[in-house]
Image (cartoon, rainbow, N blue to C red):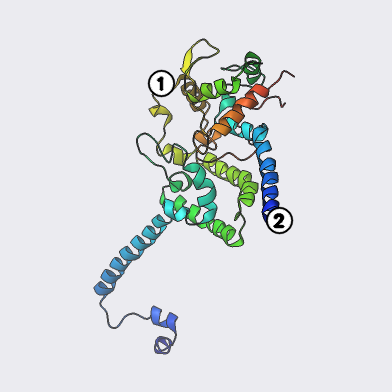
Amino acid sequence: MANLESGKQGIWATLRRPSVKYSMLGLLVVGFFSGIVFWGGFNTGMEATNKLDFCIGCHEMRDNVYEEYKYTIHYSNRTGVRAVCSDCHVPKDWTHKMIRKVKASYEVWGKLTGKIDTKEKFEANRMAMAEREWARMKATNSIECRNCHDFDAMNPEIQKKTPYKKHMDAKAAGQTCIECHQGIAHKLPKGFKKPGTEEEEE
Amino acid sequence: MKKLTLAAAVAAISLAGFSSPALALDVEAAKGLAEQNNCMQCHGLRKDKDGPSFMKTAEKYKGKAGAADEIVKHITSGKKVKLADGTEENHKIAKTMPPNDAAQLKNLAEYVLSIQPK
């Protein structure tokens, strides 16, 4: 019976059959090193999709959000520290990064179907896209912002009084960055009003 | 020759068509720029907050020549301003995309000047 089974053909049978040629150590060593190569390659590939150049490889990003971002402080500033797309839009830790990358497949679908392939279409969808991203950031307590920014690191001697007061109020109220700082690196969607600024219409 | 005249006429018409809206106040664009620069955090349209309302500013400059330029200077030079609580602070410098776009800033200034009491 056993002989009959081992005599089975096919790739699955071959894979299940113990090796008769290679030593256990040989297999383990080869497996171990190929593991490193594949894992490293996978992560390097993933990291490549986090580069600014990758993001602006499609005209939807290059002609819209990238154009706007180029004029903001996260792109160009006194000290030359730059936060690129992924620094704000992709979580740093591996698990959440993978989840975000899998979700990005929807964006690939959007690219293929041309959902935002003109300026008009982009503007028509800007509010929906922005709200989705703001919700994501709020849910993570603006973790990408906090990779660099921290309430406790704000110096009242250097930060202007009004923003400092607002920051401390926000901290006390348990608010998170994105609840006030929408559209810091991109244009706000048309008609969007920041919370706390609503008042009588003309 | 006829073709040339026609082309000139078309050019003249399209020029006239494009240049007049550029002079008119674009309220939506001004509101967008105000929102982007957080103006409304300290200024209300008709309500004083840490800073005076736009309506108050419009009243102050009513009938004055170069009012819009004054306001542009005010929002781009980062000069010291007095807040409602009596303390002083440098006014935020309004940013545009592309940077220092005079037309956008002027449009915002004109918008501020256009706010009338209800």
Q: Amino acid at mark 1?
A: Pro
Q: Which mark is residue A156?
A: 1
Q: Count all numbered tags in the image, as a single digit.
A: 2
The numbered disc on residue A106 is none
Q: Residue furthest right?
A: B118
Furthest residue to the front? B1
**Residue drawn at (47%, 38%) of the image:** A72
- Across and down, in percent, residue A138 comes to 54, 39
Q: Is residue A143 above or below residue B56?
A: below
The answer to which image quadrant residue B27 occupies is top right
| Closer to the camera in the image, B118 or A82 | B118
- The residue lying toward the viewer, choosing from A52 and B67, is B67
Q: Label 2 is found on which chain of the structure?
A: B
Classify residue A135 as left or right of residue A144: right
Looking at this view, is A179 or B107 the one in front? B107
Quadrant in which the N terminus of chain A is drawn: bottom left
Q: How far from the left and from the top, in percent, is residue B92?
A: 49, 24
Outermost residue toward the top? B86
Q: Nearer the viewer, residue B25 or A158?
A: B25
Residue wearing tag 2: B2
Respond whether the residues carrying marks 2 and 1 are from the same subunit: no
Residue at the (51%, 10%) spot, across then down: B86
